[in-house]
Image (tube, rainbow, N blue to C red):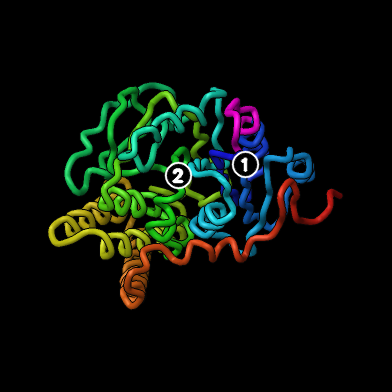
Amino acid sequence: MVTLSVIIPTYRREAPLRRCLADVLGQCHPAFEVLIVDQSPDHEPETWAALRALPAHARHVRLAEPSVTAAVNAGVALAAGSLLLFLDDDIEIDDRELLARHARHYDDPGVGGVVGRIVNAERRGDLPRPEADGPLGFLQMNFDHPYPMDVPTAAGANMSFRRALIEQLGGFDERYTANAFRWETDFSLRAIRAGYRIRYDPEARVLHHYGTPGGCDNGHLLGRTGASHAWYEPFFRNNTYFALKLLGGGDRARFLWRLYREHVLNRAFATAGPTFLARRHAALARGAASGWRTWREAREEPGVEGRHGSAGAARATGGPGAMSGPPVK
């Protein structure tokens, strides 16, 4: 009987995905399944071969449109386990006990979620223990230190939640689109407000290859290229929606001011010239307006925190132990 389901949303990743799958399938947990929720339009022959060779306890399903939040919701709807572990497709696991390290915390009924250590594969070394207090404590978080603690948010590269809690809260909010910034913090805050704790376990460790091409293209974060402006527009949209939805009063103002200070008028951007600053401010204006409209639309759906957790599953194709897609050429 499956007790734990591993859900891996993937988009435009090849060798990193193959490495991640090999590491997950090498876990020694006695009763787990793997769900690869694929939004890539196509793959290299080597990746198709790896997907065709999946064992019986792994499943490859595809979504027609890329969306990390729709992908995780699709995985939730298809999963058989009572515990759900979400992993990025560009991580590396050097510990066969990762699944067990997540699962051991759920003997405590007050624990709703667990987030493991996320080590920057290109820059090793402990970061300081975060002082993650207060309603904006999630902004102080890092997930690469050796101190077990309760935390105000999880991170999608290496996090797990009780399936019952995800269903109770209506799934992950699919209004977070494109780079989907803040989708994990949105769910984490709702879980904590529902009375659950999120535990950070530094022994549940993965290596994260930040900046890998594909995925949500987060290499544009703090970027100064022309392409970064287009990436930043949904970034501002998602953060504005998050602030309006879940923060109030002074906390909202402090969050938005910090967003502006760090991502519009920081020191590096200020030296990039007036044309760059004008384009970044334009991205902010468009993104903030879109975030406000999204928040207004969401308020017209009372009682719906996520967006129909089964919607992503309805768009998914594939079956147990099988994959969909063109044949290997």
Q: Residue shown at 33%/56% (left/top)?
A: 273
Q: Residue shown at 46%/58% (left/top)?
A: 231
| Residue placed most toward the observer, 315 or 209 | 315
Q: Is residue 278 left or right of residue 104?
A: left
x, y percent for residue 271: 31, 49
Up/down of 208 relative to 271, above or below: above
Question: Around disc 1, counting alpha carbons within 10 Å, would you say few (fewer than 14), some (14 to 19), or many (20 or more)?
Answer: many
| Disc on the earlier residue, 1 or 2 | 1
Secondary structure under tag 2 reads loop
x, y percent for residue 48: 76, 46
Q: Nearer the viewer, mark 1 or mark 2?
A: 1
| Residue placed most toward the observer, 195 or 117 | 195
**Is 26 within the magenta?**
yes
The boundaries of the magenta stretch are: 23-32
x, y percent for residue 234: 42, 62
Quadrant housing the N terminus? top right
Residue under label 2: 156
**Is 216 within the magenta?**
no
On the question of residue 270 being in view, the answer is no
Q: Is residue 302 left or right of residue 158?
A: left
On the question of residue 26 being in view, the answer is yes
Q: Is residue 60 left or right of residue 301?
A: right
From the image, give the main secondary structure of the stretch colored magenta.
loop
Question: Around disc 2, counting alpha carbons within 10 Å, would you say few (fewer than 14), some (14 to 19), or many (20 or more)?
Answer: many
Residue under label 1: 34
Most distant residue in the front direction: 1
Q: CA distance from mark 1 to mark 2?
A: 16 Å
Most distant residue in the right direction: 329
Name the amino acid type tagged 1: Val
Q: Residue shown at 47%/40% (left/top)?
A: 157
Secondary structure under tag 1 reads strand
